[in-house]
Amino acid sequence: MDSSEIRSPAEGGRLGTPMSSRKKLGIHFIESEDRRMAFGRGYSTPAGSTPVDIHGKSIVDLSKTGGWIAALFIFGNEMAERMAYFGLSVNMVAFMFYVMHRPFSSSSNAVNNFLGISQASSVLGGFLADAYLGRYWTIAIFTSIYLAGLAGITLCATMTIFTPKQEGCEQLALLLGECEAAKPWQMSYLYTVLYMTAFGAAGIRPCVSSFGADQFDERSKNYKAHLDRFFNFFYLSVTVGAIVAFTVVVYVQMKHGWGAAFGCLAIAMGLSNMLFFIGTPLYRHRLPGGSPLTRVAQVLVAAFRKRNAPFGSGGFVGLYELPGSHSAIKGSRKIPHTDHFSFLDKAALQLKEDGCSPWRLCTVTQVEEVKILIRLIPIAASTIMLNVVLTEYLTLSVQQAYTMNTHLGHLKLPVTCMPVFPGLSIFLILSLYYSLFVPLFRRITGHPHGASQLQRVGIGLAVSIVSVAWAAVFEKYRREYAVQHGFESSFLTPMPNLSAYWLLIQYCLIGVAEVFCIVGLLEFLYEEAPDAMKSIGSAYAALAGGLGCFAATIINTIVKSATTTHNGSRSWLSQNINTARHLCGTI
């Protein structure tokens, strides 16, 4: 392939040497390419991504900022956010059912929607961070919104005015739907504060992992090792928050009530906010690069306008890029040209009539940003079904546990604590990852880190399939056992001879899948995303999680609708799990 230097009109009026075909279009950068990524791209110079302080000024002495100390403050914020997220996800279904007197199916769907909104709308948080606010201020603003939502939920659980009357609402009346239902305004208030927390989480989630990774110096020879360990420790903090939510918060709810449980989440979030702000002098920041959506739109519009223009037409031949080492995008380095999605290259093809309009002429770096975002979509999309499984496990597997014996010797584990076991398996795996898994996989793959990021994603997806297969087999066995032993109608009476700890197999397997898939995905998206779109890249993972939650709701709705006959027979997703087919019908 011929090589031609990309130049601006100021450097001589031509963008490259003449060429007769697209295949001859090449690129040469004067700067050395010192870093290659999984997609085969590299950055020409780190100058565009120099870390700055909170005032936007370059940091002279990097040794006084960033590093693991700064990351610890960020870990604390994420731990509290995950504690609140999982605390709400595991308790809100029961709160709506037992306190607000909502049917279990609608309560489950409401929580699935909460989980979905909090993740899918993360794209908005990533956009604001990359475009205008920066990651620090986005976290600061949305974590305050999160705290306000938690405070509102605590008020709902403590003040009787926000809940229907509980007098005379025994378990049988609750199951038959005879309890006084919550008034529309009461449910509206609950949904408002619940989705306020979802909105707050949407701003935090795409920024916190990227902001933590920003604390490490890309020019350090240990950068790759630090980044690899950071994402493992980051997910370890997520896991600790989940374990606390599934144990301590559940215990507080059982001993002191719903108000105390939700109040604990609000207090933990408030303390983590203080911790996050205390670490402000230590943080390294990246300048926001302007609206990424606008840049994407400019590339698409410019490429469409010049869709019929052949390469080599016009007064200038070649692709347009600014001269020198700096990119036209603030906070970003130049990105070398690639041959993928060549139709987008028309956006950087300079014609005489283009003038200086960014909607007619874009730089190579801007075009490559769009290409990278497109290439990342199938990677993130491949994890949607894993998130469907995780969502169903949070709701339907808890309902399984209600019908089984949760005694462990003389200790009776509360049913709502069952989802702690995936967290414990994640904690164990992450603790042993570098001492056990990395050496083992290094012998198999030859990869210095045991397995590449995409290999880890693939391993996680494969293990999730095994987990679902086991869940379906065991649910079939559990249901047949209930029918054979006379528990078909008494679905809230635990079967004494069927241990709930059989569920640990599917829980631990999904924990293993989560470690490999989600951690590998987060690290992959951060490294591959363009400099000025790191938060958007991280939002891809959250968006896949949100789509998984919505998909779970859609699957539940379709299954319930399709299996409910006109003569009133029970659907597969009826409240009586012993006459229904929950996991066999949905997963």
Image (tube, helix red, strand yellow):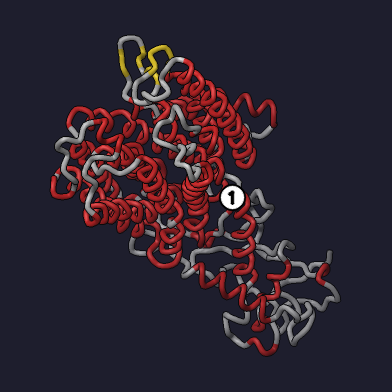
Is residue 317 visible in the rendered structure shown here?
A: yes
Looking at the picture, does residue 368 appear above or below residue 230?
Answer: below
> Is residue 339 depicted above or below 548 in this figure?
below
Q: Nearer the viewer, residue 564 or 51?
A: 564
Near mark 1 (Cα within 10 A), the count class, few <14, some 14-19 or many ≥20, is some
- Closer to the camera in the image, 300 or 354: 300
Q: Is residue 427 visible?
A: no
> Who is closer to the viewer here, 543 or 478?
478
The residue shown at (31%, 28%) is 247
Furthest-bottom residue in this view = 353
Q: Residue at x 56, y 23 (%)?
A: 436
Identity, as a three-letter code, of the amino acid under mark 1: Ala
Residue at the spot 45% in from the left edge and 51% down from the top edge: 210
- Where 532 sits versus 389, above or below? below
Assign a secondary structure to mark 1: helix
Q: Quadrant location of the N terminus?
A: bottom right
Q: Residue placed farthest to the front in the image?
A: 567
Q: Position of residue 331 (x, y in %)?
A: 49, 64
Residue 14 falls left or right of residue 207 = right
Quarter of the image with the C terminus is: top right
Residue with the most extreme right position: 20
Name the residue carrying label 1.
381
Rendered location of residue 316, percent (x, y): 73, 83
Q: Nearer the viewer, residue 22 or 159?
A: 159
Q: Position of residue 7 (x, y in %)?
A: 68, 76
* Left or right: 158 as drawn, with respect to 417: left
Q: Quadrant of residue 320?
A: bottom right
